[in-house]
Amino acid sequence: MFKSKKTAWLTIVALLVPTTAGLFGSSAAQAADVPTTLSTFTVNGTDVLTSNTLSVDVATLNVSETGVLSADVVATATDTANTTVTITGDSGLAVGPNTLSVSVVASWTEQVQNPNYVPARTEANPAYVAEVQDNPETTEVNEYAPAQGEPTITYPAQGTEYTTESRTASQTYTRTINVLNNDTGSVITVNEEEVTNGDGVEVDWGTLSVPVTVTPSDSNATVKVNGTSVGLVSGVARTSATGLTTGENTISVVVTAPNGEIDESLLTVTVLPNTDASAVITIDGIIAEDGDEVPLDFGSTDPDIEVYTADEDATYVVDGGSDLIPGENRVEIFVTAADGVTVQIFRLTLLVQLDNDTTAAIYVNGVERSEGDEIVLPYQT
């Protein structure tokens, strides 16, 4: 069969062009779009997706048999199928700030191009000898020679074009749980005496104020004394209860725990009555002291006795001082202080002068005569 060399050459050229299959195929698979966001994030039912801090009443926390505090934390990933959620810090809570962490880890696989992949290829066979046709322009015969070998060699692909690799991404959400104590306990002193609700202290008469200290068990608690807020310095609230009057005075101490719970203690400060039983005594305007002898004119029977007690709440009783007779008259004045116990006795002697009138009416034979009169009497009278 006759075949031109031109045809054979063109065939060879076509076979020598390497294939592009596998070299310019589709690119590596893109990373999977797996979000690490949360769709739900609550602590004890309160949404904390957009807040960094949450205050929680200690009384609302879970308490284990061993006294471990924990909160109910719900954290749900947006993609629940390809993510895992890990919660730490929801247990072992203590009063004050606590750190809560939620970690969202996304996992997926990607098809990536294999750097070791060698695609299938076809190359010219260097050992190939094309067939030789008879040349009609020559007289030589038997020039024809068959082809030796194959014009190309095909090499198979080595490895796989793409490999599967695992990928992960993570995001951590951190929140501060501020556990508020419900402890309203405190140590209270009034006038340096430790007291509890319902207790009272006694102070001397005339006391107008007493010091008050309140030491809450929790230094974050607040204190009010008689309705006025008192700040804590080194954990102690110091103030004074003022405006005290004689008798009972009530002091209100309110301790508010960080969680808002309130405890009120009502205390009593009793200002004792005055014990002053002193007094100033006047007799007809003359000041007299205990033991004095007070002279009075003859004829005095009911002198004006005035008692001015030093304390307006003191009382007095005057024993004697009326229906006087000439000479000595005993008077006792009993002054009782406001306490009802203290008594002072003032003992006085009222000296009513004796009559010093020496005048007399003289009658002679029934006729009143005066000094110096001459009286003529009958003979032998």
Image: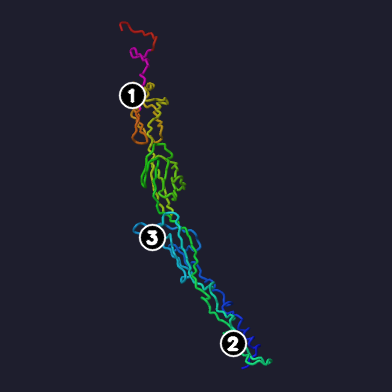
Q: Secondary structure at mark 1?
A: strand
Instruction: Tell me the distance, in whole angstroms, between the alpha carbons under discs 1 and 3.
Output: 89 Å
Quadrant placement of the C terminus = top left
Tell me the amino acid under the disc marked 2.
Answer: Ala
Q: Is residue 361 magenta?
A: yes
On screen, residue 141 versus residue 236, left or right, reads right
Question: Of the residues tagged 1 and 2, which is closer to the observer?
Answer: 2
Which residue in the structure is indicated by mark 1?
329
**x%, y% of residue 79?**
48, 70
Q: Could you say which disc has been placed on residue 147 in the image?
A: 2
Q: Is residue 50 above or below residue 352?
A: below
Tell me the amino acid under the disc marked 3.
Answer: Asn
Q: Is residue 186 above or below residue 178?
A: above
Q: Secondary structure at mark 2?
A: loop
Residue sitting farthest toward the left: 380
**x%, y% of residue 243?**
44, 41
